Image (spheres, rainbow, N blue to C red):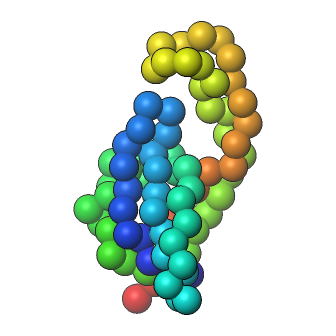
Amino acid sequence: MWLVKDLQTGDLMCYATLQNPEGNEIYKGASFEICADSQIYINQTVRLTYEVVNINDCESIEPCGKTRQEEIITGMEIIP
């Protein structure tokens, strides 16, 4: 279980700031869909779902044909 502290849309993915029950913060990549619904998740305790996806591996936001595989958050289930 994680507390969602912040969600920021970046060039390559969404970036999540999460806090565990001990108060330690971590930073994880997430899908753009998670950031699109950020107002639902901020300050909520959630269960996370991860998936390995292809992420653009370019110098800029412009497509360059290179990708890398990375495990990112693809789902958040709010825990009441």
Farthest residue, direction front: 24
Q: Position of residue 45 (x, y in %)?
A: 43, 80
Q: Quadrant of the C terminus?
A: bottom left
Side of 6 relative to 48 (left or right): left
Quarter of the figure with residue 78? bottom left
Side of 75 relative to 34 (left or right): right
Q: Residue at x 67, y 33 (%)?
A: 54
Q: Position of residue 3 (x, y in %)?
A: 44, 77
Q: Residue at x 61, y 63 (%)?
A: 49
Confirm whether residue 78 shows in the render: no
Q: Residue at x 62, y 51 (%)?
A: 72
Side of 5 relative to 18 (left or right): left
Number of marks in the image?
0
Q: Residue at x 46, y 57 (%)?
A: 16
Q: Quadrant of the N terminus?
A: bottom right
Depth check, front residue: 80 or 43: 43
Farthest residue, direction top: 64
Q: Position of residue 35 (x, y in %)?
A: 37, 50
Confirm whether residue 51 shows in the render: yes
Depth check, front residue: 2 or 17: 17
Name above or below for residue 52 compared with residue 79: above
Q: Position of residue 32 (x, y in %)?
A: 44, 43
Quarter of the figure with residue 50? bottom right
Depth check, front residue: 41 or 9: 9
